[in-house]
Image (tube, grey):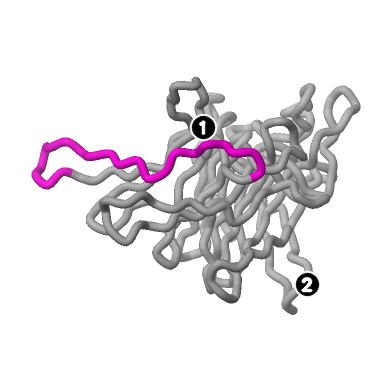
Amino acid sequence: MIGPGGTLYTTTQGSPFEEGYILGLAIALVPPSTQGGDWTEYELFAFGGTAGVDGDSPQAGLVSEGGSLFGTTEYAGDPYCGPAGCGTVFELTPPANHASAWTETTIYTFGDRPGDGGGSLAALTVGPGGVLYGTTSIGGSSTCPRADGGAVLGCGTVFQLTPPPAPGGAWTETIIYSFTGVNGDGAYPAASVVRGANGALYGTTEHGGSATSACPATYDVIAGCGTVFELTPPAVSGGNWTETVLHSFSDANGDGSIPVAGLALSSTGLLYGTTSGGGTAGKGAVFAVAP
C-alpha cells in the first residue's frame, strides 16, 4: 500500500527471532530524501503468535481506513483449524509521535464458531462506512470432497466485518458466502475481492469450477481449474448474497487455470486478472472477463 509521501506499507511472512520462530512483520519503507538514496525500513509490528490473541504469518498486504492499517494473518488464533490456528484480522494504530510503537489489535479471530472461515491469504477490501471484506482459503459451511473420498475443512468463504458503533467495541463478522466446490462452484479463494460501483464483489477461486477433468482432484485439493465469481448484495439488509460464476477456467484452447491473484475492475466493467497455469504456453495467462 502506498501512503503519504510515497511511503510503502506491507507485511513479511516471516522474521527471524532468537527462538527460531518465523511469525511475520508489518513494515514501512520510507523513500530517500534525495534521488538515488537508500530507502529506510521501519518495523511497525512483530507478530508474536500468542495463542488465541496474536496473529501469525501474514500473507498479504495492508489497507488503510480511518487512520489505521488493517490486514489478515493465515495462522494463530483459534485452534479449530488445527494446531497452527485459523488466523486473524488485525488493526495497526499509529503512535501519537514517530518515536513510539504502533499498537496492534486483533479485531477478529477466525474459527471461533461453526461454519466460520480460516486461513486467509488475501488483503482486505474497504467498503462504505469502514466495512471490511475479505476471503478465507478454507472453512465455511460446506466440506470439500477429496480424491481419496474424504473431505477437508470447507471450501473457503467471503466474509464481511462491520465496525463497532463506538470505538473499542467488537467488530461483527458475517459470512456472506461459503464456497461448495460442487456443481461448478469454486473453491479455495486465495485472493482478495474487488468492489464494484453497484456494491457487488468480484474475485477468483484457485480451484473448483466446471472443468473437473482438466484439473483433477488430488489428495487434498478438489477438482477444477478455478473460477471468476460475482457476489451480488441482497435487496434487503440482512438477506442472502447471490453468487454467480462468471467464468470457469478450462486449461484448454489457450484458457488459463488456477488463479491465485485478485482482479482489477475497469471503469467499463471489465475484470482483468492472471492465472498461474494454462494459456497457450502452459505457463499462465492474463485474461479479461467482459460483462
Marked residue nearer the N-terminal end (1 or 2): 1
> In screen coordinates, is 222 left or right of 256?
right
Q: Amino acid at mark 2?
A: Gly
Image coords of residue 106 (percent x, y): 57, 52
Magenta run includes residue 105: no
**238, 15: nearer the viewer:** 15
**290, 126: nearer the viewer:** 126
Image coords of residue 236 (percent x, y): 74, 79
Residue 239, numbered circle: 2
CB under 8 Å between callouts 1 and 2? no
> In screen coordinates, is 51 left or right of 282?
right
Residue farthest left in this picture: 34
Q: Is residue 255 visible?
A: no
Q: Name the mark nearer the viewer: 1 or 2.
A: 1
Image coords of residue 72 (percent x, y): 55, 47
Instruction: Label 1: state its secondary structure.
Output: loop
Q: Which residue corresponds to the image point at 70% horizontal and 37% vertical from the top-left?
A: 207
The magenta region covers 32-52
Q: Residues within 10 Å of mark 1 (few under 14, many from 20)?
A: many
Q: Which residue corresponds to the image point at 52% horizontal and 25% vertical from the top-left?
A: 21
Residue at numbered disc 1: 23
The majority secondary structure of the magenta stretch comes to: loop
How far, Cα to Cα, is label 1 from label 2? 38 Å
Residue 99, numbered circle: none
Report the quarter where the C terminus lies. bottom right
Image coords of residue 190 (percent x, y): 61, 41
